[in-house]
Amino acid sequence: MKRMLGMTLSTVIMMASLSFFPTKGFASSNEVVPISLTSDAPGYPMDENSTRIKKILLNTNKYALTTWWDEKKNFDAQGEGYLDLGGKEESDIRHPAAMSLGLAASLSFHVYDPSYIGVSSSIATQRTSQLVSSLALHHRVNTSQGWGNRWQSAHWAYFAGFAGWLIWEDLSEENQEYVRRMVEYEANRFIEYDVPYWKSPEGEVLFPGDTKAEENAWNAQLLQLATAMMPEHQNWNLWMNKNIELMVSSAATPTDQNNTYVVNGKPVKDWINGSNINEDGTVVNHGFIHPDYMEFIAFNNTSGIHYTLAGMSTPEAAFYHSDLVYNAYIDLPFASPPFEGPGGTIYKNDSSDIYYPQGNDWGTDRRMQFATLDIFADVFGYDSSLSKGGSYWEPLHAQKVLDMQNRHSDGHTYATFMEDTYDGREEWVAHHAAWALMAKWIKDNPALRISNKSYGPTYKRLSGKDRYETSVEISKEGWTASETVIIASGENFPDALASVPLAGKYDAPVLLTRSNQLPGSIEKEIVRLGAKRIIIVGGTSAIAGEVEETIRNLGAMTSRIDGKDRFETSVKIAEQLPSSDKAFLVNAYDFPDALSVASIASQQGIPILLTKQDKVPFSTQSYIEHTPFITLIGGESVISGNVEKSIGEVDRIAGRDRYETAVKVMETLQPGAKTMMVSNGESFPDALSGSGLAATLKAPLVLTRYNEVPAVTKEVFEEDSIEHFYLLGGENILGEKIPMTLLDQ
């Protein structure tokens, strides 16, 4: 039996229960804020260029509601219920989704013309609603085994979701919820997403011939939509900061690795971890410089549409390097040879022709993306320094599209396969025309605001499948190479904690090992770092001789620092540091307080010495007798008053518990930090590895419980100074609620 558009929501939720994406952050109620255009908002402009764009969009509507609906898709035979889309591949989902956006834009901006198209407004609205609802229903979050959670599915969900938002009031409550859940699900996929790059920070090509500029930009579009539609969602900050990261990364050049210009709260260099475009603004895809893929900036620019419709300001990141890329179309010459003839610039004066310097594999007559870019450049103002701006180029490219459409009575654009070889070419024209029309409307809209404000702190989780691989991930985050590596026990903390200042001396990562076997991941990381000196910390009871032999076989000079016990080992480490008149004294049997001070000790070259709770061992006492300034870390339950009296005049930093002690250490010794490390206060290995990175980044460490943030730690994140934090360890160490709680301050 055919399912009807009003099928019960509970039925669909039951069907989808086996296919949910992990449920972190899923909202339990409909949080979409519909688009509300104020009474004084401008109508659609009537100038010649705007009228041309409207005509192009109407032609795509005409084709969509006649030939495409009745013949290509045969949807007319399915009646008025949910449509069978034919499958869950690109042609089944992306193409109808893109077409739905063209229809929704025409209807919602009141440019739809039933007399021209030959289909009434009510039927057009019903079919658009039917199409959007069917796309949303068939998503895996709403129907078991549906489409979604795959490469490019965020792109498809964006088209359908944006179309749904535009016609929100024409959808039933059930279908509104299907749309909301679809967008929310796809947005949540990116909360801890590792952003891909064409090239590494060192310039190594990671994906030969395949920039990630377009991929990152279309994923950003979904997050733009989610943050515009659901401004009060509990994951809003997570979505927005990932959106900004994706947009900046999509347009990152090799030299941006050192770019200190601040975009939405952080220097560019801190947003990125590689590059996706060339220094001249060109983009390599399909193995060559490809003008069609330079259009990725349009996907970022659509932020200006989404956020204006939502009554929000648009992040400046949406236009990062748009001027550079657009310049590469207009004012960047290509000599022939080595490039293909005739050479010159990609755009040609007084012509709609496009020059492809290294060839083209998508056909000879694609123009709608260029017309859309021209409009965006003019509307958002990134063409001001060019020899000719977007307003010059737009009529040349747009008229070409309209002339092609005028060849066909049903309004479709292409006559032959070679004009555009993409099989979703007509739908592709429709969604570009929708963007172009909405940008035209926005041009003189006072609601358009661009802001470079910060959207709160960002975060990154550093983790592997175990403590050893996590130490590798921490090392990779902080070091591209290192002459020295500190090897410490991943099973026993005292020697390892005392070694952190030594790591600071050599600007070296701390890698963890098992007591009797060097993990393969650690061995590979030593090789990657190109280490020439390995320092093993601890005796053979902590790190066996077999491990040392394995390390020696890697070819690096290897030494060991150890004493007859943990106290003497800490002293021997201290003796390897530059002379200091200060020392931190911590409990040798209770790691949390020592963790909190380790990165600061490393930064300042201050040794960490170990003591018993109620007595200072001889080796430690001998050392501190010559050290005038001693700071005890922890309260009297950790280091007793007797110890304090035996030493003499000392300072003490302590809180009511380990969490408050960590905060007090930070507030006393490193106030105003912009970067923070967050570690589990009941597990030492990940924090130990992270202390070396924390020292390099001048980032103090605070502690939390597994899946609950103590009030004193929350208060730290209420300060506006924090821009970024690292989570040290996977979700088995720091649960999924931790980042959300910290970002919600």
Image: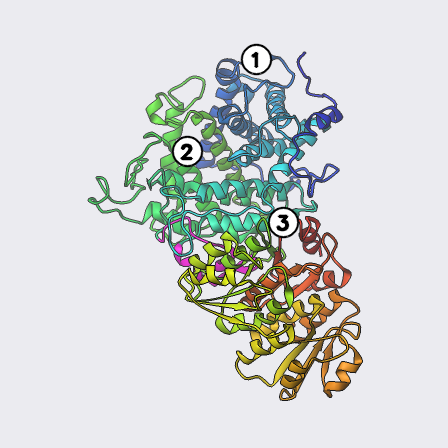
Residue 414 in the magenta stretch? The answer is no
* Sequence-first disc among 1 and 2: 1
| Secondary structure beneath label 1 | helix
* Sequence-first disc among 3 and 2: 3
| Secondary structure beneath label 2 | helix
Q: Residues within 10 Å of mark 1 (few under 14, many from 20)?
A: some
* Foreground disc of the pair 1, 3: 3
- Left or right of 173? Residue 523 is left
| Secondary structure beneath label 3 | helix
The amino acid type of the residue labelled 3 equals Leu
Residue shown at 53% from the left, 41% from the top: 219
On the rendered image, what quadrant is the C terminus found in?
bottom right
On the rendered image, what quadrant is the N terminus found in?
top right
Q: Which residues are magenta?
A: 254-279
The residue under label 1 is 76
Residue shown at 72% from the left, 71% from the top: 664
Task: Pick whichever, 460 or 634, lies toward us.
Answer: 634
* Residue at the extreme left: 337
Residue shown at 62% from the left, 84% from the top: 623
Query: Is the residue 618 above or below the residue 401 in the image?
Result: below
- Left or right of 391? Residue 680 is right
Q: Residues within 10 Å of mark 2 (few under 14, many from 20)?
A: many
- Left or right of 493? Residue 506 is left
Q: Is residue 694 visible?
A: yes
The amino acid type of the residue labelled 2 equals Met
Numbered tag placed on residue 238 in the rendering = 3
